[in-house]
Image (cartoon, rainbow, N blue to C red):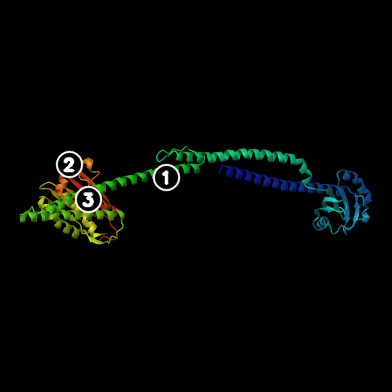
Amino acid sequence: MRRVIFAKFIQIILVVLVLSSSIFYIASSSALLKNSRKDMLYTLRAMDKILDYSGDLTGEVEKLEQPLNENHSRFTMIRMDGSVAADTGDVPASSLDNHLNREEVKEALAEGVGTSRRYSETLKENMLYVAVRSKYSDYILRMAIPYTGMKEYLMLLLPAVWLSFLVAIMYSAFSADSFAESITKPLKEISQEMLKVNGDYTDLSFETYQYPEINIIAETTTEMSRNVKEYLNQIELEKQIRQEFFSNASHELKTPITSVQGYAELLESGIIQDEGQKKDFVKRIKKEAANMNNLINDILMISRLETKEAEVVKSDVRLSILLDDIIESIKPLAASHEVMIHMDCKPLCIYANGQQMKELFGNLISNAVKYNKPGGQVWVKVTEEDRNVIIQVKDNGMGIPKEALGRIFERFYRVDKGRSKKQGGTGLGLSIVKHIVNFYHGTITVRSELDAGTEFTVKIPIQGKVC
């Protein structure tokens, strides 16, 4: 890259030098031609004033011959018909061609002043001609000088031009090398810093460089390294969660399977003869099978909510009717725990999946009942605020320790494992609730105090019109 920048820089400088030299040459040639014409015109005007047109014109012109020859100039007097009246050249005026078709003569006749540049066959060199119409007689006065433009000065200027080119190239080469170094060095430093990372993307550190564009590269690289680190941490966290999930799921399934296997082996062995005991074992087997079925259903629901693979059928769900059905189904559980449930639900409906809403309400209310005290109370309140459905489930039960509040939505996490086992359930209820709330882009918060109770607040945005 450095070599390419250096070569491009030198190339641009050479092009600029050639263009600037060409422009200078053209501009100088134009200025020289303009000044030469001006001087010749001034000389012709002066001659027009001092010439005696009433006397011998040849004699008058001969007086001017010596100073004109010293300046390598030629003076010609031309009549209006184009014939030459007098000339300072070596050829007699009478033998010269008619000059009426000369460009400078035609311009002088038409406009008073005429100029032209051409090769003179008589003098065998390039000449500059300037002609003026006399103000004092019917003659055209013409002056000619050898004119090569800037070519005659080129050889004089050539050493200075080459020296200027050499100095410019040397300075440009130095500047190009410094410029290339100022660009490539930061890029090398960024590259070397990235090579030192060695898997730890938080160790990147870059200086502040003189070019904002390179600083942007450094900042972007640092930001990308942070994102990669966060992504890797997230992958590692998900890996740990997955391992814990499989471990917990295996443990939760192993216990009922072991019980079912034990009861089945006892029945198969024929040791148990009492019919009442046999029926009890069959009842226990069915209960453990139901627990396994519930656990598998909860695991499948979490999987569907996480992957969002299954198509969720939504409809308008009337929350008051849904809540009545859920509380009715929980009444036996509430009666066994001696807990009273109070409901306050506004006539609202939400565009959602009915089964998911059942799971959400059911898990929150059943937990409030299970982890309550005899004679406890549960309050369920549903309202609408700022296009959000607000669901509040509050109890005055045992409460949750502060250190456990951050983990209650984890799968299979139990605050009091001994008491939780006695209460039944899969340990996935609050995790399912959290996933359902996230599925509808809502939020869930919890407040709790030991021996005072717990309150869950769910806020779900309303889609479409409120029923």
Q: Report crowding for label 2: few under 14, some 14 to 19, many 20 or more residues within 10 A (C-alpha).
A: few
| 2 vs 3, front mark | 3
Q: Nearer the viewer, residue 72 or 126?
A: 126
Q: Is residue 384 above or below residue 4?
A: below
Quick one: quadrant of the N terminus?
Answer: top right
Q: Report crowding for label 1: few under 14, some 14 to 19, many 20 or more residues within 10 A (C-alpha).
A: few
Q: Which mark is residue 428?
A: 3
x and y percentages locating residue 138 in the rendered image: 87, 56
Q: Say which amino acid is labelled 2.
A: Leu
Give the structural element (helix, strand or loop) at label 3: loop
Residue at 16% x, 59% y is 325
Q: Say which amino acid is labelled 3.
A: Leu
Q: Which mark is residue 450?
A: 2
| 2 vs 1, front mark | 1
Q: Identify the residue under disc 1.
A: 224
Give the structural element (helix, strand or loop) at label 1: helix
x and y percentages locating residue 317 in the rendered image: 23, 61
Q: Is residue 193 above or below residue 108?
A: above
Mark 2–mark 1 contact, CB under 8 Å?
no
- Cα separation, mark 2 vs mark 3, equals 22 Å
- Cα separation, mark 2 vs mark 1, equals 44 Å
Compared across the picture, whether 246 is left or right of 452 comes to: right
Compared across the picture, whether 355 is left or right of 190 comes to: left
